[in-house]
Amino acid sequence: MNDRKVCGAPKDNVTRLSVKKKHHTGLRLLALVCLAAAGLAVWLNWGSISPSSAVIAIQAFLGEFGDSKFPVSYSQGSFRDAAALGGDVAVVTDSSLLIYTDTGLQIAERRHSLSNPRIAASGGRAVIYDEQGKSLRLESRFSELFSTTLDYPITAASVNSTGTVAAATSSQDYLSELTVFSHTGSQLFKWYCSTGRILSVAVSPDGQQVAASVISSENGSIKSSVAIYSLSQQTPVAQTDLTGTLIFSLCYQSNGNIAALGDNLTAILGSDGSRKATYDYSGKTLRCFCAGLSGTLLVFSRYGVGQESTLVSLGEGGAVAAQANVKDNIKYIAYDDGVTALGSTGLKFFTSKLAPSGSTAAAGDILKLLCIRSNAFYFTPATAYQHKIG
């Protein structure tokens, strides 16, 4: 247990006052040390950050040591999307990007004019884009790094932790286009796709590859093709076809494999396009999922059982690492240090092996769920909530 306990007989008033005074002195000393450390970090990096960013940096650094301010009401607009931005929480409302530390201190508020804003993030970088619009911008904790307007409406976007951005759009002369930008906004790669529509994109952790799921039809059946490109050449490294499957999400893993999530299976592909593993849903209905660098979580409705779900954890190689049945209808799932699921009865917590570790009630109309380290965050139209796991 990590909770702090005090045991023993009560002391007299003088001793209690003395202890209290020493405690406050210690807190003041800790605050001074933290301020000095933050000041030193800003001084060492002064050439690369603006004065306003320096103020934010000090506020954010000290805010991480404070009491939690959650739940917090959004200072601007209503909730549209959210993502983990490093250890922070990035919330996109219908009017602004809001960034909070994991204690609820708001460290940024940046306005946008996007009609249908979405966010994708990795590490300390986030791409905010207008789904079915043309605007896109790359954000960090402290500033907007670049913005651009594409020629055609955006259908999907992705970013890696170094700020390499991939964006898929519709096209006039082709069926789709894929553009990759560096962290400064310069164009690194362009692909004109004539075989189908790009539904999902992903950038490799090292920024050397980009993958796209292309949807078409063949002999009356749906067909997904995962095209893998090296940014240094225009011919694909590989193209893997999955006939009869709709691949709607791609995610690179830390070992370079690609998790391709579909409506009836999840395929694990190598960076060369080879099929490493396949998890067939065997008729089960996929309700929600969460994919990341370290693996993939899938949630299925249990056939014939109205109030139960099956959770499946796939490792980076695609093998089943854990599985559990839950007596609830799971709506969202997320993971980091542990696993959190949102059901009709509230939040449920699990270890990485999907062993139950607790539960709690959750308030309001929840629109999204995130896990950042040992914290679960959930979002309603007007408020962000936090629950510490464990």
Image (tube, rainbow, N blue to C red):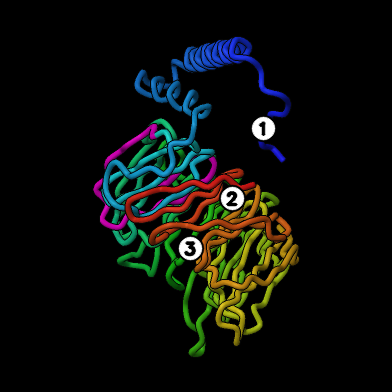
What is the secondary structure assignment of the residue under circle 2? loop
What is the secondary structure assignment of the residue under circle 1? loop
Q: Which residue is pictured at 34% across the width and 44% down the height?
A: 73
Horizontal arrangement in the rendering, residue 325 relative to residue 219 (left or right):
right
Residue highlighted by disc 3:
200
Horizontal arrangement in the rendering, residue 184 relative to residue 356 (left or right):
left
On residue 4, which mark appears? 1
Category of crowding for the residue at label 2, using alpha-carbon neighbours closer than 10 angstroms: few (below 14), some (14–19), many (at least 20): many
Which region shows up in magenta? 106-127
Residue highlighted by disc 2:
204
Residue 33 x %, y %:
56, 13
Residue 384 x %, y %:
41, 48
Q: Main secondary structure of the magenta part?
A: strand
What is the secondary structure assignment of the residue under circle 3? strand
> If you read the primary sequence from the N terminus, does the residue marked by circle 3 or circle 1 appear first?
1
The residues bearing labels 2 and 3 have C-alpha atoms spaced at a distance of: 14 Å
Horizontal arrangement in the rendering, residue 90 relative to residue 284 (left or right):
left
Query: 72 or 321, which is in the foreground?
Result: 72
Q: Is residue 244 above or below residue 104?
A: below
Q: Amino acid at mark 3?
A: Ser
